[in-house]
Amino acid sequence: GKGVEKDGGKAIHYLEEAAIGGHPIARHRLGLIEWNNGNNERALKHFIIAARLGENDSIKVLMDAFRNGLVSKDDLAAALRAHQA
């Protein structure tokens, strides 16, 4: 909020707590943070987990990553199967 310092470390900590607790959007956001920090492999793992938890935006990211050769067909298929279950 206005007049409040941002604490990125705390934000990541709480996102990690939520992701460990099974929150798909938190997992997706961790993927975005990792991607923006250049940790693509780690980011893709977050997106796969989020997709398996039903997060639609993660499916879109994984489809794009597959088109660009960053995700295997098997990983994408497994994420899609779990997402649809």
Image (spheres, helix red, strand yellow):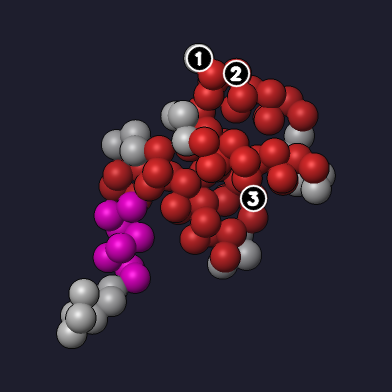
Amino acid on which disc 1 is placed: Ala
Answer above or below: position of 38 versus 15.
below
Residue 78 image point, x, y percent? 63, 23
Which of the labelled discs sits on residue 81, or is there none? 2
Q: Which-is-in-front pick, marks 3 and 2? A: 2
Residue 47 image point, x, y percent? 55, 42
Answer above or below: position of 19 versus 14.
above
In this view, the residue farthest toward the bottom is: 3
Which of the labelled discs sits on residue 85, or is there none? 1
Answer above or below: position of 25 versus 13.
above
Amino acid on which disc 3 is placed: Glu
Horizontally, residue 46 falls left or right of residue 27, namely right
Amino acid on which disc 2 is placed: Arg
Tell me if mark 2 has few (under 14), some (14-19) or many (20+) residues whose alpha carbon lies within 10 angstroms of its own.
Answer: few
Q: Note whether residue 49 is visible.
A: no
Residue 10 found in image quarter:
bottom left
Q: Residue at x 56, y 67 (%)?
A: 37
**Highlighted magenta segment, given as a residue range:** 8-15
Residue on which the image places disc 3: 41
Q: Quadrant of the N terminus?
A: bottom left
Q: Nearer the viewer, residue 68 or 2?
A: 2
Residue 77 is covered by the magenta coloring: no
Q: Residue at x 80, y 42 (%)?
A: 67
Q: Nearer the viewer, residue 9 or 25?
A: 25
Horizontally, residue 85 falls left or right of residue 75, namely left
Report the Cα–Cα distance between label 3 and label 2: 21 Å
- Lower sequence index among marks 3 and 2: 3
